[in-house]
Amino acid sequence: MARLNAVQKAFICQRLACFDTPKTVADAVKEEFGIVVSRQNVESYDPTKAQGRTLAKKYVEMFEETRKRFLEDTSTIAISHKAVRLRVLQRMAERAENMGNLMLAKDLLEQAAKEAGDAYSNRRIHEHTGRGGGPIQQETKVSTLDPSKLSTGALKELRNARPESDE
């Protein structure tokens, strides 16, 4: 196993701070730098793990700062953007269709429709505004009563139902 230089140590520390697994980081080190490093060695650069308790202060600070930035700013994570997710779903659906896997293609289309705005859902979106986004128009109709068309019994009921005044 090769001895790691400062750049490689920082690479490992930052990848772990971004919640990559030790195996993922070990694979990335091999791909990026062409060296093999064990998962246990990688884990020693994570101060939140028992193996990382003796990690040098500068790497602990780097880890904490990287994790803080990572958790606060999701804009650097491509998949956090709707357009990126739709683009990936597009490629996957095309591939599934070309392979003849129509059920997978259907599921991917449904996922893309949901991602784009609930196009596949049974939910109804109810608008709580009036025409053109304005206020809802309400109309109140008041009907007048023609006493000449009422029976004597109805007139007596109306007289009895009237509130008494405080005179």
Image (cartoon, rainbow, N blue to C red):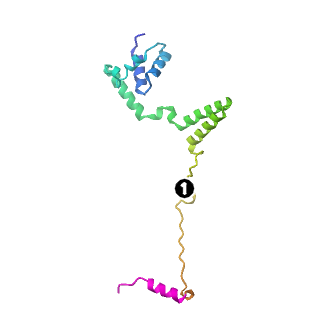
The image quadrant where one finds the C terminus is: bottom left
Q: Specify the quadrant of the image occupied by residue 40.
A: top left
The image quadrant where one finds the N terminus is: top left
Q: Position of residue 75 (x, y in %)?
A: 47, 34
Q: Position of residue 33 (x, y in %)?
A: 47, 15
Q: Amino acid at mark 1?
A: Glu
- Residue receiving disc 1: 127
Dot 1: what SS?
loop
Q: Is residue 111 magenta?
A: no
Q: Is residue 103 above or below residue 52?
A: below
Residue visible at 47% across and 22% down in the picture: 24
What range of the chain is rendered magenta? 151-167
Q: Is residue 165 magenta?
A: yes
Q: Position of residue 140 (x, y in %)?
A: 53, 71
Q: Is residue 139 above or below residue 86?
A: below
Residue visible at 40% across and 31% down in the picture: 69
Q: Specify the quadrant of the image occupied by residue 61.
A: top left
Q: Nearer the viewer, residue 74 or 146?
A: 146
Crowd band around label 1 with a 10 angstrom C-alpha radius: few (<14), some (14–19), many (20+): few
